[in-house]
Image: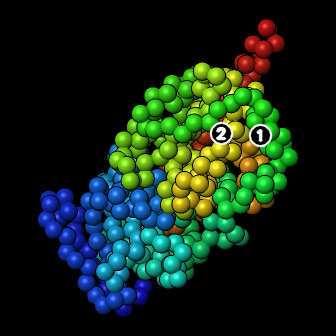
Amino acid sequence: MDRSMSLTSSSPSMVASGHSRPKARGTTGALALRYVDAARWDRLASGFDGICQEQLHTYAARRWPGVDLEPVEFVSGGEVVGGALVMLQRLPLGLATIALVKWGPILAKETAPNAARTIDEMVAALVDEYADRRGMMVSIMPKVEKGPGNRLEALLAARGFVSGVGVQYPQRYVVDLGVDDDTRLAGFAQKWRYNLRKSMKAGLRFEHAGPEELGRFFTLYRMMSARKMFPDFSAIDTVDALMAMPDGTARPELFFVSKGDETVAGGIIFTRGRTACYLYGATADSALALRAGYFLHWHVITWLRENSTAQFYDLGGTDGFAGLHQFKSGMVGEAGHISPLPPVMNYASHWRARAAGMLAYKAREGLMRGRDRILVLRLNVMRRLRQRVGRAE
């Protein structure tokens, strides 16, 4: 690791007890790591180009209540250039601790001329603080990128990080928001274009709603969950906290589609930074025939282009469902891209952290694979039962 950088940090205990944080030191161009409190982090990171829901303290505290969270900012030349929300997972028997950064570290300005160097220096600072000084395994999950490779994954590998486990269905579907409506429409898959045009003739209405309308979304979501009878492993329990974030922060936006007086579809969209993200959706029984999902996303794309700084719209993955692949790939079209999330990348300076961390990841992977197999069996049984009921009727 490059030891020429000036790396400083205040301790987490000082922040928690209310002591002032030491100022970053070093000459212009040196990078300093500083711990910050949760409220400052969410306000600060909300203005970063690279912000995503996984890097919000508000989200992670509700989603992962069993881990400790340490937000850190990176300062260069007196300016905050990026940061990371570090999740500390202590392993059983006190064998080691994993310092996990999901979809980070994040840059304040992703298009800055020195952005690549800044990312490299932020990674070096995390390794110095968490792996070298505190004896943890550092795990970093890079965000999806367009192209044959992933720049952060390559950077981490060059710094000695080792590829670990990945998600079972890694493909992410990303819409490019930088094209005009005519180009976008021409780039959609033919079936997607056909369904969108059908929806435009169905008398639907698009609406951008405030957080006070969240109950309306949950009513729709509960109806959908009861209809589909799928086990819900999503982070839907974080929505209340996210929507309670104050104005000017990375609070998600709420959208609805209605037919007359009936709400037939809804979506919760993360809109901050350069990449917006589809978080949750819900539909009524009538939505399929009305093609309400096509109508919703067409108007969300327009809203993002006109009302946000987002240049991309991440639709998420598919969990292996062919119907979702067809819908999302058709929307991505020719301008967007379908690219895989890289696996988690791991680094440890000490053998105990390395061995315990790798064992913990392998055990978790086995548990998740077993859960997924049970889910597939359950869905197949439900599908056959529905087919029998349909034939009986």
Amino acid bearing label 2: Leu
Q: Residue at x 44, y 65 (%)?
A: 48
Left/right placement of residue 17 relative to residue 118 reads left
Residue 335 visible in the picture: yes
Q: Is residue 175 left or right of residue 105?
A: right
Q: Say if residue 355 shows up in the picture.
A: no
Quadrant in the rendering for residue 220: top right
Q: Please state if 345 lies on the left or on the right of 375 as rendered.
A: left
Q: Under tag 2, what secondary structure?
A: helix
**Quarter-of-image position of residue 22:** bottom left
Which residue was labeled with disc 1? 196
Can you tell which quarter of the image residue 85 is in?
A: bottom left
Give residue 260's position: percent from left, percent from top.
64, 22
Q: Quadrant of the N terminus?
A: bottom left
* Residue in the foreground of this view, choosing between 286 and 321: 286
Q: Residue at x 33, y 67 (%)?
A: 72
- Label for residue 237? none
In this rendering, position of residue 6 left or right of residue 224: left
Q: Residue at x 67, y 71 (%)?
A: 149
Question: Which tag, 2 or 1, sits closer to the chain's start?
Answer: 1
Q: Which residue is mark 2?
A: 296
* Dot 1 alpha-carbon crowd within 10 angstroms: few under 14, some 14 to 19, many 20 or more: many
**Amino acid beneath label 1:** Leu
For this orientation, the residue located farthest to the right is 190
